Amino acid sequence: MKTTALGSSSIEVSRLAYGCWRLAGEGVDGARAVRSAVESGYTLFDHADIYGGGACEEIFGNVIAESPSLRDGMVIASKCGIRIPGVLGASGPYRYDSRRSHIVESCEASLRRLKIETLDLYQIHRPDFLTHPEEVAAAFSELKSAGKVREFGVSNHQPRLVAALQRACPMKLQVQQNEFSLLNRQPLHDGALDLCLAETQTLLAWSPLGGGQLGEGAGELLTSQRSYEPARVIPLLDRIAGEHGTSRSNVALAWLLRHPARVVPIIGSTQPTRIKEAAESVELMLSAEEWYELLTAAETAPLP
C-alpha cells in the first residue's frame, strides 16, 4: 500500500489506517482481522482505551505476543480521555478527563494491554473542558521523556483548541482525528483541514463511509448521532464506480484521499474481504471534476 508521512514526523504510515474498535465484537475473530489488515498493507493501527473496555487492545497485544516480528512494521496509536461509568474502573457521570495523572496512567495501562513498550502515537480522545492545555502538555512531555510515546495528536478537537494546545506543547502535534466523509464534511468548513495544511498535520478520518451508509454492506451500518442523507450521493458514487471498475465504497474513500492534506481514512471492517478491498482505494485517483461533482451532490446548498 502507498504510504505517507505522519504529520511532519519521520514516521511513515499506510494511506489507510485500520481501526481496532470492533476487534472485541460479538462473533468477531479479532486476531484474524488484524492479520488480514497486515497482509493487505495497513501499517497504522488505531486504538482507544475504551474500545471494548480495553479488550480490543488486549486482543491486539496477544497478536503481537504470538508474532513479535509484526511489531516492526506497525505504527500503533491509542487514545485516552473518555470516562464511561463501569468501563476501566470509571465511576460518576459519563465525562472527559485530560488531567495529567489520568493521561499518564491511561497510557501506561494501554501499553500493558498492548504488550509493547512505546506507543507511536497518543491522542486525547475528546477535549476535557476543565483541563488547561498546559496540563495536557505536561503529561505529553512526561510520556515523551520516559520513552513511552513517540508522537502526539488530538481527536475531535476544534481547530482553535488544537492551536491553543500546540502553543502549550513543546513538541509538534502531528495528528488531528475527526469524523470526515462525504456525509460529514465539517473538516472542510471548520478549519481543521486548513490547519492540517498550514501545520503539516495528518487528518485521520473516522467513519469515512458515513457510518457504513456509503458502503455496500448494510450489515455493517453503525449507530451515529448524526442524521446522514446518503441518497443524494449514492447514485453518483455508483456511476463513478462503474466508470472506474471499482466499488462504491472505494470511490467514497478516494474522495477523501484526493484532498491535499493527505487525509488517512480509518477502516473499521472486521471482514477480511472488505479490509482487502478497501486497500485498493489508494490506487484510485479521482479527477477534480469528479471530486467536485460528488461534493456538490453531497452539499445541501450550491457552492457560493
Image (cartoon, helix red, strand yellow):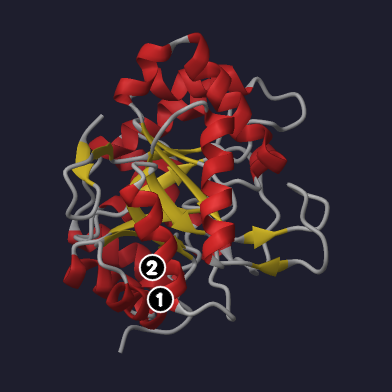
Q: What amino acid does circle 2 point to? A: Ala
- Residue 176 seen in this snapshot: no
Q: Give left or right: position of 172 versus 303.
A: left
Q: What amino acid does circle 1 point to? A: Glu
Q: Nearer the viewer, residue 103 or 87?
A: 103
Q: Quadrant of the C terminus?
A: bottom left
Could you tell me if the residues under marks 1 and 2 are in contact, i.e. CB atoms within 8 Å? Answer: yes
Q: Position of residue 195 (x, y in %)?
A: 26, 73
* Quadrant hosting residue 246: top left
Q: Residue at x 50, y 23 (%)?
A: 34
Q: Nearer the viewer, residue 44 or 123?
A: 123
**Would you place residue 162 above or below residue 276 in this image?**
below
* Quadrant hosting residue 220: top right
**Would you place residue 20 above or below residue 210 in this image?**
above
The residue carrying mark 1 is 134
The residue carrying mark 2 is 137
Q: Nearer the viewer, residue 198 or 219?
A: 198
Q: Position of residue 225 (x, y in %)?
A: 68, 66
Q: Residue at x 52, y 47 (%)?
A: 107
